[in-house]
Amino acid sequence: MAQPLTPINLVSPAFKGINTEDSPLAQDTAFAEIADNAVIDKRGQLAARKGVSVLTTDATALGSDYISQVFYFEDSAGNTEVFSAGNNKIFSGTTTLVDVTPAGYTITADNWKIVNFNDSCYFFQRGHEPLVYSNTLGAVTPMSSVPSASVTSAQYGNEVLAAYGRLWVTDNSTNATVIYWSDLLIGSDFSGGSSGSIDITKVWPEGADKIKALATFNDFLVIFGEQSIVVYSGASSPANMVLADTVAGVGCVCRNSVQNIGTDILFMSQSGLRGFTRTIQEKSMPLTDLSRNIKQELIQQLLTRTGPTHSVYSPENYFYLITFSDTNITYCFDLRGQLENGAYRVTRWIACPFVCYDRKDDGTVYIGSRYGIGTYSGYSDNNLAFPFRYASPSLTFGDSSRLKILKKLRPVLINGAGYRVGIKWSYDFGEAVRTAFIDIDAQYPAYFNEGEFNVAEFTKGTALSKINVNTTGDGSVVTVGLEAQINGQPLSIQEFNVLALIGKTV
C-alpha cells in the first residue's frame, strides 16, 4: 500500500513578513525567510512591489549624481512646484531638472530639510544660509535677501519644523541644544516680534544629548535627541512652554526617518524602528519596538550607514518606507496592524534605486533616484526588471528528526502573464538550491460559471495560475520558494502547497 503524502499548506505565504530573529525551526510558517521587493497586498497576499515610473527626461543638470531630496510645494492660491536637490544644486520641475540655485550661492552638501510654511517654501541645511521660495518672490532666494528678514548663522540649522504658526530651527554647526523659533507667521524673522529661543541643555534626562529632529503631536513639541526625547506642552505660545515629559534611553538617529502617521510618530532609533503614543489620562509615553522581527539586521544597517536615511509614510499604500541609499536597501513596514509581538509586518526591497520621497495630498508618492524624479507606480524600475523573491521558513512537518522526501510543490499565483517563474526548494539549510522553471502563459480572467470546477475559479477577473512541480531529493528540513523578474505585470502568491513523504528517523 502506497504511503500517503503529508501536506503543508502555506496559505497566504509570508503574511507576517520576514523574520530574521527567531530560530528558523521554531517559526510560524506565516513568516518568510526572504520576501524581497514585495508588499503584503490588500488581500493579505505576498505581492511584487510597484516600481518607479520616471518623469524626468532631461537630467543634464544632475550629472552623474542622484536626487537626494524631493519636495512638492503648493501655496494657498494653488500654485505648485516640485523642488529637488542633487549634485550640490537646487532644481525645479520634474520632466526637465532646471537649476534654480541662487547666483553666487555655494552648496557643499545635499542633505536639505524642506518645509512648506505660510505660502513659502523654506530650505535648511547645516552650515548653509536658509533659502526661501514663494510665488511672489518668483525664485529661490537666500533668506537674508527677503524683505523684513532677520537671520544669523545661529539659524543655519539642519532641522526645521513648520508648526504653530512659526518655523522652529535647531542643530547648527556649533550648537545642537538650542531651538530658535520665528516671529508669528514670518518664517524669515528670528529677532523681532514674538520670536525667541530655548536651550534645553538642563532638561536632558540623561545629562547630555544633542537634538536630531523635531515633531509635533497634538499641542506638544517633541524634541528627539540621539539618546532621549523631551516633550514640551503649550508650544502654540512658545514663551510659555513647559516641560511635559521625557523619555530616557531612546532617541532618533536621523531626522529624515521621522514620520507622523496621525495616531503615532514613527522614528528610527539606535535599536530600530520605534513609535510613541501619548495617553492623556496617564501622562505617559509607552514605546514599542516595531522592527523586532528584523532587529539585528536593521541595527547593522544603522551602524554601517555612510549617509542619511530617507523615509515616507503613505496611507494609500499602508506603508512606512525607510531607505538606506548607500546599500540600495529599503524596508517596507506594513501599518495595517501589529503582530502578536507588537511588531509591524516588514518586507525587504533589494537592489532598489529609490533614494528619497515626498507625498502629495492626493496620495502620489514622488521618488528621487539616479534617474531623476518619478512616482511610485507601474511594475518596473524605469522600464528595467527587478527580482521578486520568496523563501519559506524551515519546514519540519512537525518532526525535524525524520527524513522528508519532497514530492510536489503546488504554488498558486495571481497574474504574472509572460513571466518565467523559478520554483525553488532545498534541504537542511544547504546552499544547493534546486529550481524548476515554469512559464506563465498569457491569461484570461476566470469569471463565475466559466471553466471547470477546481481549474478556473471565481476570481473577479483576476488571472490565476495553479502550478504543479515534481521535486527530487530528501532531507530532514525543507525550504521552498520562488523567484521572478518583475517587468510590467503584477504578480502575487495566493498559496504554496508542499507535499512530502515522511521517512525514517535520521
Image (spheres, grey):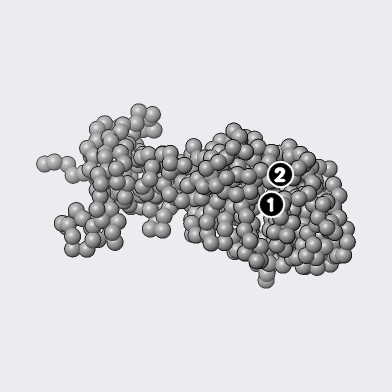
- The quarter of the rendered structure image containing the N terminus is top left
Residue drawn at x 76%, y 39% as measured from the top left: 106
Disc 1 is placed on an element classified as: strand
**Residue for point 49% across, 50% down:** 376
The one nearer the camera, 241 or 342, is 241
Q: Residue at x 30, y 33 (%)?
A: 435
Local crowd at mark 1 within 10 Å, few (<14), some, or many (≥20)?
A: many
List x then y, in percent, for residue 94: 57, 48
Mark 1 or mark 2, earlier in chain: 2
Name the kind of residue labelled 2 in the image: Thr
Residue 500 can be seen, yes or no: no
Residue with the most extreme right position: 192
Residue 354 in picture, x, y percent from top left: 54, 43
- Which of discs 1 and 2 lies nearer the camera? The answer is 2
Q: Is residue 50 left or right of residue 67?
A: left
Front residue of 86 and 18: 86
Question: What mark, if any, has residue 114 been given in the picture?
Answer: 1
- Locate residue 374 relative to residue 80 in the image: left or right: left
- In the figure, is residue 447 to the left or right of 146? left
The residue furthest bottom is 281
* Most foreground residue, 185 or 76: 76
Q: Kindly identify which residue carries mark 2.
A: 101
Specify whether 20 is left or right of 265. left
Q: Is residue 312 visible?
A: yes
Q: What's the residue at 26%, 39% (across, down)?
A: 438
Total numbered labels placed on residues in the image: 2
CB contact under 8 Å: marks 1 and 2: no
**Residue 418 occupies quadrant:** top left
Q: Quadrant of residue 239?
A: bottom right
